[in-house]
């Protein structure tokens, strides 16, 4: 597990607990035929009307269900957290997500002023946090995030690989020689 620029509040439970909740959301996405990414956002401020560690945003990918290309787990969870706090500034939160945020989600994280992002598995093709685009720590942006990577990385990788392996088997030829079709993009 790599730790970058991070000072963890000692009064919060461990990262694995919250990543496990995000994995449960990813399972819900996979069961619905969505790319299995799950996200949890927790409160870290003791002065709010909710306890430290309270889950204030919880979501999984819903792009197919909502027919919305922006319905990624992080964006949906950010919307819920902003509603729960009554403020778009999510300065006293931690975002947990099973897969490295894409550039769109990284932009939403920056705009929401989320100070800490914890993710399980990197996305070497489209990662918006560190792997491809360094949006969460870009020097020209007015907000930067602390980033923790590799929390429950194997479990996060397993759910993604299992989902895409199953999806590919739907594209194998039938015994009569015809190929099964699935109109969704395998690179989601």
Image (tube, rainbow, N blue to C red):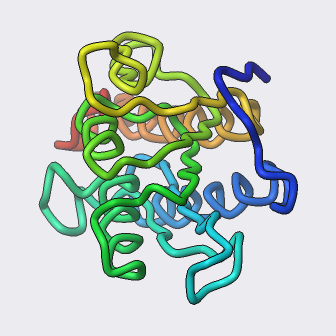
**Residue 106 rendering spot, x and y as whole percentages:** 33, 35
Tell me if 10 is positioned left or right of 43 in this view: right
**Residue 140 rendering spot, x and y as whole percentages:** 24, 15
Q: What is the residue that sits farthest to the bottom in this orientation?
A: 49
Camera-nearest residue between 112 and 98: 112
* Above or below for 153 versus 127: below
* Above or below for 27 versus 168: below
Camera-nearest residue between 143 and 34: 143
Residue at screen point 61% across, 85% down = 50
Residue at screen point 62% across, 43% down = 159
Residue at screen point 39% across, 56% down = 73
Tell me if 21 is positioned left or right of 131 in this view: right
Quarter of the figure that contains the C terminus: top left
Give the mark count. Answer: 0
Residue 170 image-quadrant placement: top left
Residue at screen point 70% across, 52% down = 19
* Above or below for 3 versus 181: above
**Residue 77 rendering spot, x and y as whole percentages:** 40, 64
Residue 1 image-quadrant placement: top right
Tell me if 107 is positioned left or right of 56 in this view: left
**Residue 180 rendering spot, x and y as whole percentages:** 27, 39
Tell me if 144 is positioned left or right of 7 in this view: left
Camera-nearest residue between 110 and 151: 110
């Amino acid at each position: 597990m790599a730790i970058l620029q991070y000072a963890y509040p000692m009064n919060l439970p461990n990262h694995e607990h919250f990543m496990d909740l995000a994995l449960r959301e990813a399972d819900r996405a996979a069961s619905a035929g969505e790319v299995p990414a799950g996200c949890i956002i927790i409160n870290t401020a003791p002065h709010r009307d909710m306890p430290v560690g309270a889950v204030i945003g919880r979501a999984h990918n819903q792009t197919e269900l909502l027919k919305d290309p922006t319905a990624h787990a992080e964006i949906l969870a950010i919307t819920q957290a902003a509603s729960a706090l009554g403020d778009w500034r999510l300065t006293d939160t931690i975002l947990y997500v099973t897969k490295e945020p894409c550039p769109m989600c990284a932009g939403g994280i920056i705009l929401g002023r989320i100070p800490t992002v914890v993710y399980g598995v990197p996305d070497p093709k489209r990662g918006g946090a560190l792997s491809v685009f360094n949006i969460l720590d870009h020097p020209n942006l007015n907000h930067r995030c602390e980033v923790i990577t590799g929390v429950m990385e194997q479990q996060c990788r397993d759910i993604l690989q299992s989902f895409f392996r199953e999806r590919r088997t739907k594209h194998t030829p039938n015994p009569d020689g015809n190929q099964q079709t699935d109109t969704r993009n395998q690179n989601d």
